[in-house]
Structures are given as C-alpha cells and as structure tokens.
C-alpha cells in the first residue's frame, strides 16, 4: 500500500495549549516534525507517563513558572509532552551517522512522546535493548537514568555498602533497587503493604512496610539513602545514615505553589553543615543521556535490570494514564502503546 503523501506530512498528537487537568490535552492533527541538523525523527511505538509529564501539564509547582525552563508564565513551552520515547528511526537530519531508517531506538526526549513522531537529538539516542519490547523500553529512559545518576554519580555506591530506597515500588524506586543490587550493595526498600512482595522480588534484601514501621526509628544505619518519596524530611533521614553517608533526594509530594521544591532544596542547603553528603539528582539537566542509556542497556541485556510495568494504556487513553500517575498508586512504570 502506498502512503498518501498528505498523510506523511501530518501526525496525531496530544497537544497541551494551556495548563490544566488531563482534560486539557487535545488529541489533534499537527504537522509532522522535520529533522534538522543532528536530529533523528523517531516513529514512536511506545512512551510512558510519569510525574515529570503531569507537573508540566499542571504547571506546578507554580513558582517554577517564574524560573525559566519548560514552564512559561501562562502556558507551557512544550506543546507535546512525553519525556520517554521508544520506536523506530523514520529519518535522520544532516550530519547524523550511526542511525538509519528502521533502527529500533529509545531515548529521553524531554518532549514529543505523546505524538506519533518525535524529534530526538542523535547525541541522546541509543539502540533499544534487544531483549525488551517497545513498551518495556519506553519505561526506562527518565526513571532509570534518574536512579543511575543518583546511585552511580551522586552516591558512588560500592560493593558491600548498605542502601535504603524510600519509595522502592515507584518508577524510579524499582530501578534503584535493581541498580543498587547490580552495584553490589545490600538493599533495603521502603514501600506500602501491597508492594512488599514486588520489592522483594526485584532484589531487595530487606523490605520495610511503612504502614507497620517507621524506618527512621528502627535503629539501622545506611551508607546511602535514596529518597524517591519525600515522606520524611532530610533531617529525619539523617538519623538512619552513617556518619559519612550520602542522602540523595529525587522528589517529594507535589503541591500547587511550592512543593516539592522546599524538600528538594533542603538537602544541598543542609549538606555544608553536616558530616554526611546531602544532594539531589538532576536528570533533566543531564548531558550524558546517551552514555547512560548505553550503560543501562548493558545491565538490562545481562538480566540485572528489568523494567517493572504497572499498566499499559492505548494511545487514545493518555489522559487516563496521566490520572493514574497523578493518583500515586502505580507500582513501577505506566506505559502507553502508540
């Protein structure tokens, strides 16, 4: 069947024209992106839904609208959300080498996953792990990259160390448990009662059910504390750290105006005054996305890391997928087949 030339120039996408709920996303026909120099046009086969996307959708915390970045004062600077992309190369721009039409790839594109095609800089694109489906691969880029930066680059986890992952059943948390184990650490995960079995199944040596126990009062000490939940303050988490331990905060409970910014900012502000290292993991500003994806691919293809999928939605159900993500009940990643 020969494609209609007019159809080749357009695509379907969920477009965000103003801040709001998932209902603010409009499924419409838009011009298909054209790859410029250094760009790759990817036919999106799957994407994922995560807090990064709905924070942009809501424009929250609202103070972020005054700080530059992807949030404008009245509307988002990104019209088509979707930070994770897995698919096939459709076309390449001038100067791109190493990729050709049909290649199976994945990337953290920062935008575009909620459309049938997305532009990705070739420098941020990596071959899709051979043992993953497109849906599984779409679960990896932002969440796994965040966990990798936190554990490998910020905490510098070494064999024999003890690692506590708070929020171990979430998107970042499930990758963090597996990565910490791959790095040779003894891992304790904190999660709710319905996810205890899941966290244990992905490699945690110990699991703390927060409905039954407060991990800050168990008398245990950890070399690394990775906080994906924001359920306790940075100062409270210091109680469970060794004298030279490292605390890495990923995020916290969202809010309309400020949260989770105070929780995230508190860690580096406290750090100069204590013996421990208190820091954050900024994946959005990372310039090593391709290198990190290649490292993750090795771990995935060796069987040391496997994406945990909470639920898979059809492309037309992206608003419903965002609602589930906002509700905070997902175990692992929420993915979308495009």
Image (cartoon, helix red, strand yellow):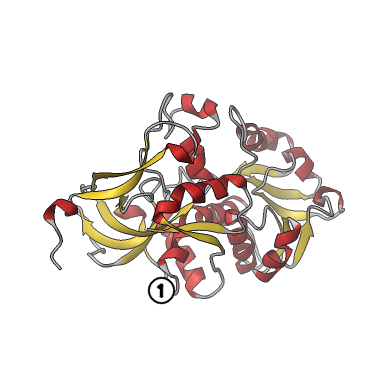
The residue to which callout 1 is attached is 130
Q: Is residue 11 left or right of residue 24?
A: left
Count numbered badges in the picture. Answer: 1
Residue 8 lies, with reference to residue 267, above or below; the image says below
- Spot occupied by residue 18 in the image (x, y as percentages of width and height): 41, 31
Q: Quadrant of residue 186?
A: bottom right
Task: Identify the residue at horizontal 45%, vertical 71% (top origin).
Answer: 132
Quadrant of the drawing holding the N terminus = bottom left
Q: Residues within 10 Å of mark 1 (few under 14, many from 20)?
A: few
Q: Position of residue 19 (x, y in %)?
A: 45, 32
Residue 292 lies left or right of residue 324; in this view the side is left
Q: In this orientation, does residue 99 appear?
A: yes
**Quadrant where the image shows the C terminus:** bottom left
Depth order, front residue of 151/192: 192
SS state under label 1: loop
Question: Residue at image x 74%, y 42%?
Answer: 232
Given residues 288 and 111, the one toward you in this image is 111
Q: Closest to the observer: 22 or 94?
A: 22
Picture coordinates of residue 107 (x, y %)?
39, 56
Relative vertical location of residue 118 with respect to residue 136 in this rendering, above or below: above
* Residue 162 visible within the image: no
- Locate residue 159 relative to residue 55 in the image: left or right: right
Q: Position of residue 212 (x, y in %)?
A: 84, 55
Please state which of residues 156 and 112 is positioned toward the viewer in this rendering. Answer: 112
Q: Residue at x 35, y 47 (%)?
A: 112
In the rendered view, tell whether residue 70 sits above or below residue 140.
above
């Amino acid at each position: 069947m020969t494609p209609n030339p007019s159809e080749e120039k357009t695509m379907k996408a969920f477009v965000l024209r103003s801040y709001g709920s998932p209902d603010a996303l409009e499924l419409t026909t838009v011009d298909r992106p054209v790859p410029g120099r250094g760009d790759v046009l990817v036919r999106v086969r799957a994407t994922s839904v995560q807090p990064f996307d709905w924070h942009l959708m809501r424009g929250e915390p609202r103070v972020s609208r005054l700080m530059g970045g992807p949030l404008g004062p009245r509307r988002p600077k990104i019209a088509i959300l979707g930070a994770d992309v897995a698919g096939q190369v459709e076309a390449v721009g001038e100067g791109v080498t190493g990729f050709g039409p049909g290649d199976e790839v994945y990337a953290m594109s920062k935008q575009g996953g909620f459309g049938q095609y997305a532009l990705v800089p070739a420098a941020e694109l990596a071959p899709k792990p051979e043992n993953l489906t497109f849906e599984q691969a779409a679960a990896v880029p932002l969440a796994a990259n965040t966990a990798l930066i936190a554990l490998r680059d910020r905490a510098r986890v070494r064999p024999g160390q003890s690692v506590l992952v708070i929020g171990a059943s979430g998107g970042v948390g499930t990758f963090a448990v597996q990565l910490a184990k791959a790095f040779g650490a003894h891992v304790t995960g904190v999660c709710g009662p319905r996810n205890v079995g899941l966290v244990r199944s992905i490699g945690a040596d110990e699991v703390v059910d927060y409905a039954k126990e407060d991990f800050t009062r168990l008398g245990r000490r950890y070399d690394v504390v990775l906080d994906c939940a924001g359920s306790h303050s940075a100062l409270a988490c210091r109680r469970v750290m060794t004298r030279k331990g490292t605390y890495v905060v990923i995020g916290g409970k969202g809010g309309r105006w400020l949260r989770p910014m105070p929780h995230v900012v508190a860690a580096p502000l406290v750090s100069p005054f204590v013996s421990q290292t208190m820091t954050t993991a900024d994946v959005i500003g990372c310039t090593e996305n391709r290198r990190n994806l290649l490292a993750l691919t090795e771990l995935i293809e060796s069987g040391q890391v496997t994406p945990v999928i909470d639920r898979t939605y059809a492309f037309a159900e992206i608003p419903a997928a965002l609602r589930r993500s906002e509700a905070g009940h997902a175990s692992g990643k929420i993915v979308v087949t495009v």
